[in-house]
Image (cartoon, rainbow, N blue to C red):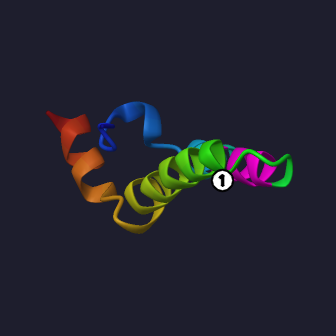
Amino acid sequence: MFDFSHPFFRPLWRRILIVAVALGWALFEAVTGNPAWAVVFGALGAVALWGLLVAYDRRQSAKEDRE
């Protein structure tokens, strides 16, 4: 769904912000009584958390910079 190795995602602050916005919006939807949207944004936030923070390969990004 996303190319987590794209240069746009290289700065740590940007990766954290994307995850925080997705999970924050999921929380907002859950609090306002929209469970379907909360699940959608929660799943997107979980995927972003995994791809941008847990499994993010900084070495691959640096390698692509040199090419």
Q: At x 42% / y 68%, what residue is drawn? A: 54
Q: Residues within 10 Å of mark 1 (few under 14, many from 20)?
A: many
> Is residue 43 found left or right of 29 in the rendered image?
left
Magenta span has 26? yes
> Is residue 7 found left or right of 45 in the rendered image?
left
Q: At x 85% / y 46%, what residue is drawn? A: 32
Magenta span has 67? no
Q: Position of residue 16 (x, y in %)?
A: 61, 52
Between 54 and 42, the one lying in front of the other is 42
Q: How many marks?
A: 1
Q: Position of residue 34 (x, y in %)?
A: 73, 45
Quarter containing the N terminus: top left
Q: Main secondary structure of the magenta part?
A: helix
Q: At x 42% / y 62%, what residue is drawn? A: 50
Quarter containing the C terminus: top left
Residue that carries the numbered disc 1 in the rendered image: 23
Between 52 and 67, the one lying in front of the other is 52
Note whether 40 is above or below 67 in the view shown.
Answer: below
Q: Position of residue 66 (x, y in %)?
A: 20, 37
Q: At x 44% / y 31%, what residue is drawn? A: 8
Please give the range of residues in magenta: 22-30
Identify which amino acid the numbered label 1 is placed on: Leu
> Is residue 2 found left or right of 66 in the rendered image?
right
Note whether 65 is above or below 17 in the view shown.
Answer: above
- Looking at the rendering, which quadrant does residue 57 occupy? bottom left
Note whether 34 is above or below 53 in the view shown.
Answer: above
Between 18 and 65, the one lying in front of the other is 18
Q: Position of residue 15 (x, y in %)?
A: 54, 47
